[in-house]
Image (spheres, helix red, strand yellow):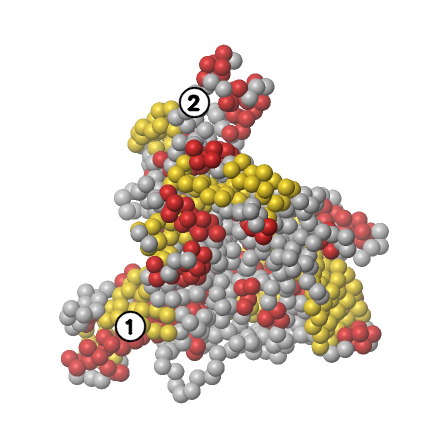
Amino acid sequence: MARRKTDESGFSRRTFLKRVGATGAAAGVLGTTATAKAQGVNAVGPGAVPIQLNVNGQVHQLEVEPRVTLLDALRTRLNITGVKRVCDRGACGACTMIVDNKTIYACSTLAIEAQGKAIRTVESFTQGTVLHPVQQAFCDHDGLMCGFCTPGFVTSVVALLEKNPKPTREQALKALDGNICRCGTYVRVLEAALDPKSATGGRRG
Amino acid sequence: MADQQQTGTSPASQTATPQAPNQPPAQTGPPKFNWPPPADRALIGTSVKRLDGPGKATGKAKYTYDIVRPGMLYARLLDSPYAYARVKSIDLSAAEKLPGVKAALALKDPSKEETSRVFYQGEEVAAVAATTEEIAEDAIRLIKVDWEVLPALATIEQARRPDAPKVFPKGNFTEAALSQEGNVEEALKNSAHVIEGLYATQVQTHTSLETHGGLCEWDGDKLTAWVSTQGVHASREGVGKALGVPQADVRVITDYMGGGFGSKLGTDIQVVIAARLAKAASAPVKLMCTRKEEHLVTGNRPSAFAKVRAGVDAEGKLTGFDAETWGTGGAGQGANFPLPYQVYPVPHRRRLHTDVYINAGPQRAMRAPGHPQGCFVHEVIMDELADRLRMDPLELRLRNLPPEADNAQWGKYFKLGAEKFGWAKRHPTGDAAAGPIKRGFGCAANRWTGQGNRNTKAICEIMPDGGVVAKIGTQDIGTGTRTIVAIVAAETMGLPLEAVTAAIGDTNYPFAGGSGGSTTVGSVTSTVRAAAETARDALFAKVAPGLGVEPTMLVAKNGRIQVKNDPSKGLAWKDACKLLGTEPISAPADWQANLASVGTSGVQFADVEVDIETGITHVKRVVCVQDCGMLVDKLTAESQIIGAIIMGLGFALFENRILDRNTGIMVNPNMEWYLVPGISDVPQIDVTIVDQPTRGVVGLGEPPVISTAAAVANAVANATGARVRGLPLTPQAVLTAIEQAKAGGT
């Protein structure tokens, strides 16, 4: 039973829907930018708009419709596919990324709202061919099976250890409660997270 | 997949003895191929890290969902929003006109009665391919369908009502099938105790993290399909047949796949649709199910209901077992399960089973089809009978086991597990301690066949530069198959793991069956060993003359080929391979019965705490003793067991496909309300694998999932004194049982 990660203060599907509800008018979603502006909402779209994303230290220019999630922008426009789409509504953590040092669900974050932020994905942790100690610990402890949830788990553990290099068991469980694995790798994921060698990675990416 | 266990409807696993019905014929003469003696094994039976760990941990591993081809389009499906309806017309014109849409297909034909109906929510009605997923979604919304909504059978009760509309051509339920042995009425009449009850298990969905689907690309008449499948060869056969294309023109590739648990053994309609869209659009097309579709249409474990009378004599021997059973596998699919569960033979038994069809997504094989259901019913009854006898339930089990055999070791494992678990501290049913938190212990056993597939083929190649490649058309579904193929090849050649390549996941490699029925490890290790031994012996033949010995005097060990009793006389592996000149060795082989075996046994113990004020169950510990014949990779085998127990916990406590009882619409087709276990739900898990190094290899993926729910349910009853006879053990179910027990019920 996953606990939902705290929503960022910015735009997400959830806050978006709430705001639309508050305006009380479908025009806020489907109408023109001018209509939205008249209501005091800084709206863009619905057509594609140019955006810049800073992913793993590299700035990408792309054009996406405002409805495109950060996850889909990375996966289907930039071919960054380590992060996975599984539940597509903020319940499973397979799309976990680190944005401005906080873990987020990229499936529930709009790409346009991630502009100007430092986005880090699982791809950034490896240095050359040398695995990040967390990635190495996942391999050593066999904290992965089919591997589809693994990038999300690795990212959650890296984010935890960057903030807290010596987590207790309880702290590690809390940090990983937002990620779901169906093969049942949890026992060994936890071992990897608590392996003292994992915390030697420092900040990478 | 020839394995009968895979159908989920077959009574094959109800045979009275633990031996499988299709035991391979006895060999005549000494076997051609053998495993090395246990003392000589460098890799087999040790803990070997999986080869694809780094690829998965870095995000570099490309799954079907991740693959992008030049000019690729994204496809989406229009699904039936109704559980039962007739499509009166489909109008694709607006969708086709949307800029970016390259192909659109109607998947129902309203002009004919038989092709116009949908029988469950989510059934595919139309499909589009477009340049982006967002455009494809928009296009789906522009498709106009004129529906005639029909009254759906949303529940078993509705389907069995005498006045129910006849929804399914073969009727809404099957005629009850009778199987019996002995005289059950007489046996029950003469029993010291008889218990009577209704037991039930819910519908569970596979919830594979990578959804079903594929990416199809045509090159003229030839099709390449990247498919999230448990069987590349089965997928090729099915896709070829569905499209009317020669199978020789179809290539299926599955390099990495994100979980299947039995749901990805067949031909996936999504792949066939992607291929048709790709043809129509003249571009590669990827079609992956949404999470909602994954819950609705890609299979599930059927429900099970059993009205049972079971008897025991004063000494605790089972006497008679009379069961009326039914269940639903959804639209037109069976729901059979083994009962009595054949760990505890019952001399007199009668069984009357009915499959009921409702308007819901059809079942598919799910990790040990039928077994968790049958095990739950029988193991809960074992505890109830023990209570009547005022006997330790473990003792009752020991008194009812079949004779010990290699694949029937429950007696030993129960004793070993009880020791590790601390079973002696178990209190009688109902924790008498003060306060709302009650603690309880429970146990249960499992069995599985796990025999290899005799049609498996492999090729092992040795290159003149020393390279070794084992080619086999199996696939790694997360179980570690790639790694065990390499382990066997490396062990045979006396090389380190990194020196060999496991080439799998492609129909260009020799035939291997689907990864189901726990048949994979017994299939691939046996066949790869035979191929590798053949290749190695061919190399010995090249090397022997130079060393002045017979080839049979040579061994491959520590990166060398050397004379058996004179290790100084020999060649480094690479120098030996140079003798091949320009011609690699390419050795094909078939599956060898003597390298695999049949049948596993295992037991599990659960330690729970139940809050009798909230009804919340917390599983604290699970202790498991399990065998799997000759152990190949200890590390990945342990992971399989741990994972199976966690999936079993989901079945025990949380998972439940809930349908609206008026409409047949699933109310939780997502991952926030269809609850699978999270990391904080996981207990301490203590795994003991009993290696049987002189047996052949047997599969392990399924057996440990079978008995977890039963052990947990028995522990909950031991804690609360109230028996929950249905799964999942939700807080509401536990509280209701406690109230009923107080009122003198059950």
Specify the amino acid type for callout 2.
Gly
When the figure is inspected, residue A191 is found, relative to residue A14, above or below; the finding is below
Q: CA distance from mark 2 to mark 1?
A: 61 Å
Residue B604 seen by the camera: no
Q: Residue at x 57, y 19 (%)?
A: A25
Asked if B175 appears above or below A88 in the picture, the reply is below
Q: Position of residue B128 (x, y in %)?
A: 45, 40
For the residue carrying disc 1, how many other residues have a C-alpha within 10 Å: few (<14), some (14-19), or many (20+)? many
Label 1 marks a residue whose chain is B
- Lateral position of residue B361 relative to residue A124, left or right: right
| Secondary structure under the numbered disc 1 in the rendered image | strand
| Residue drawn at point x = 54 percent, y = 64 percent | B6
Callout 1 amino acid: Ala
- The image's mark for residue A45 is 2
Q: Is residue B329 above or below residue A7?
A: below
Element type at mark 2: loop
Q: Which mark is residue B587?
A: 1
Q: The C terminus of chain B lies in which quarter of the figure? A: bottom right
Q: Residues within 10 Å of mark 2 (few under 14, many from 20)?
A: some
